[in-house]
Amino acid sequence: MLKIAVPNKGTLSETAADMLREAGYAVRRDPKELIVADPRNDAEFFYLRPRDIATYVGSGALDVGITGRDLLLDSGSAAQEVQELDFGASTFRFAGPIGRFSSLADLQGARVATSYTGLVGEFLAREGVEVELIRLDGAVESAVRLGVADAVADVVETGSTLRKQGLEIFGPVILESSAVLITTDRTRPGIDTLGRRLQGVMVAHQYVLMDYDLPADLIDAASAVTPGLESPTVSPLRDTGWVAVRVMVPRSDTNQVMDALYEIGARAILVSPIHAARI
Ligand SMILES: Nc1ncnc2c1ncn2[C@@H]1O[C@H](COP(=O)(O)OP(=O)(O)OP(=O)(O)O)[C@@H](O)[C@H]1O
Ligand SMILES: O=P(O)(O)OC[C@H]1O[C@H](OP(=O)(O)OP(=O)(O)O)[C@H](O)[C@@H]1O
Ligand SMILES: [Mg+2]
């Protein structure tokens, strides 16, 4: 039985549950449910605070979990990344009042507010900069205005929270984060399957299936535009001067690829979604 930790709240929770549902696992219907049994998949899901997930997985109490890379590193847990998941992307940065700091060295001796003291403390120790870390639970951008800190270190997605508080980022990127699958033992039965299923969900989101008809002598030009993951499937048509091509195309390129194929001479270009994939 694989015991899996899933974020119960916060930015990562909804997408994590959606991915698991699409990957064929049981998910909770009631947000108050904390444990969901999934006997069909020989799995059990534990809904936990994202910040605590690395601790549970690192201790060996749970086999595998979904959390943020920044939360994993902040926790100091023994758990490690199995694979990156394509959501929850953010950057971890320093920020201060506009014009006040320009480089990391300017932070020497300053008070820095953050919810991620483990992550930030380790980064600064590596860089040889000494600061006073002020640990806050959230809304750390307010700490400067309220005089509790001189600078902050926090998750930045769009940057709009910082800007509204009159802050600007400075210094190096502390971390590029995203949601990740973590474990202490990748050999545990079921982890490979979970990883492959989640990978399949990501592929189904990132790609579409494209079918088109093409004069047979244009296949090299068309293959250069749609190389596919391995190689396009080319099938004969009744009219021997033409072939049918089926290929996976990155979803974000769909219209540019259709335009380019049409220019080359492809016709009947059809696009379909991928519901599930095992690559
Ligand atoms: N805009 C964002 N704000 C906060 N966290 C984000 C954002 N985008 C991605 N994340 C990631 O989500 C994780 C933080 O989730 P967590 O649930 O702890 O905080 P939260 O979403 O801010 O919720 P809370 O209301 O409890 O503060 C981190 O891995 C972080 O990098
Ligand atoms: O760059 P942005 O797009 O503005 O997003 C980043 C902000 O969003 C999160 O705050 P959240 O709303 O989760 O509040 P919190 O600080 O209390 O966690 C995060 O802590 C940053 O403050
Ligand atoms: Mg938050």
Image (cartoon, helix red, strand yellow):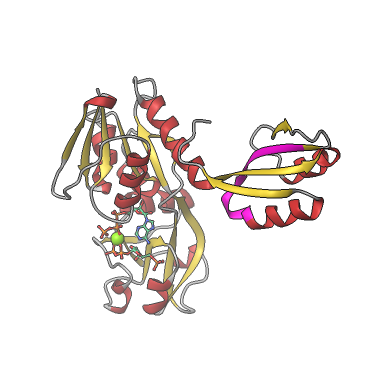
- In this rendering, position of residue 70 left or right of residue 47: right
Q: Main secondary structure of the magenta part?
A: strand
Provide residue 39's location: percent of width, then percent of height. Answer: 22, 26
Q: Nearer the viewer, residue 212 or 124?
A: 212
Q: Nearer the viewer, residue 134 or 168?
A: 168
Q: Quadrant of the N terminus?
A: top left
Q: Residue furthest front?
A: 238
Residue at the location (72% across, 32% down)? 234
Residue at the location (27% across, 48% down)? 51
Where is 13 relative to 275, above or below?
A: below
Provide residue 158's location: percent of width, then percent of height. Answer: 45, 67
Number of numbered callouts drawn: 0
* Chain part drawn in magenta: 243-254
Q: Nearer the viewer, residue 75 or 261?
A: 261
Provide residue 31's location: percent of width, then percent of height. Answer: 17, 50
Provide residue 271's location: percent of width, then percent of height. Answer: 59, 48
Quadrant observed for ligand 3 in the rendered image? bottom left
The stretch drawn in magenta includes residue 111 = no
Where is 15 relative to 63, above or below?
A: below
Residue at the location (53% across, 47% down)? 206
Residue at the location (34% across, 31% down)? 183
Q: Quadrant of residue 144?
A: bottom left
- In this rendering, position of residue 183 left or right of residue 273: left
